[in-house]
Image: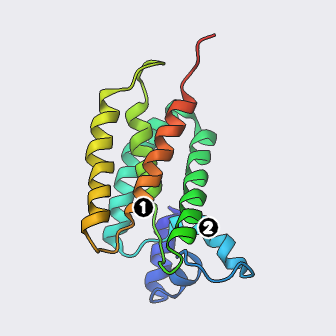
Amino acid sequence: LLSLAVLLLGDVTAGVTTEKFFMLRFTSFGDPLLYLRLFSYVLGHANWEHYSGNMMLLLLTGPMLEEKYGSRRLLTVVVFTAVTTGIVHLILLPGVAVLGASGIVFAFILLASITGSGERQIPLTLIVVAIIYLGGEILSGIFDSDSVSQLSHIIGGVIGCGFGYAFKPRRR
């Protein structure tokens, strides 16, 4: 709902609010908005298609993950993914602006593919999802020159895998 409100506000302001508060780009370490945007850029989306694609996948994976891991753990995944992806973007691509929840979506997809597997097992769904989604993003990053942040997708997927294994119950 927050992302929807941000999208509607961006439409009403002809994108001014989205660019100022919900689009991460390097400005200056003295700019307090830079630190706000490290969190808020995941609420901004370029357009309705971008928004609906991310929200559809979040709504498909989110409820199942929240039921399994709880709201606090899922919020931890969201915040960690947003900040980590944002920092990596600022370091590796300081001249490129980024917005949207795609990194979080990929974290949820990979986290969901791990959910339900045994303690020491690597689930087949994880392997297939990693090949299809992350492999596709690596290839897109190499061969495409679009405005999609494959780096966010890859980082989000890796973070989702990491949290998936961190959240697994351990035998005593």
Q: Quadrant of the C terminus?
A: top right
Q: Is residue 92 in view from this perspective?
A: yes
In the image, is 24 to the left or to the right of 154? right
Choose the circle earlier in sequence order: 2 or 1: 2
Q: Which residue is mark 2?
A: 38
Q: Position of residue 65 (x, y in %)?
A: 47, 37
Q: Residue at 46% of width from left, 85% of height from top?
A: 15
Q: Is residue 139 above or below residue 160?
A: below
Q: Amino acid at mark 2?
A: Leu
Q: Position of residue 54 (x, y in %)?
A: 38, 59
Q: Nearer the viewer, residue 156 or 139?
A: 139
Query: Comparing marks 2 and 1, which lies closer to the viewer?
Result: 1
Q: Nearer the viewer, residue 117 or 30?
A: 30
Mark identifier at residue 123: none
Q: CA distance from mark 2 to mark 1?
A: 16 Å
In the image, is 18 to the left or to the right of 51? right
In the image, is 23 to the left or to the right of 57? right
Q: Secondary structure at mark 1?
A: helix
**How is colour applied across the structure in the image?**
rainbow
Q: Is residue 124 above or below residue 108?
A: above
Dot 1 crowding, Cα within 10 Å, few <14, some 14–19, many 20+: many
Q: Position of residue 104 (x, y in %)?
A: 47, 53
Q: Residue at 56% of width from left, 30% of height from top?
A: 167
Q: Amino acid at mark 1?
A: Leu
Q: Which residue is mark 1?
A: 151
Residue furthest to the top in view is 172
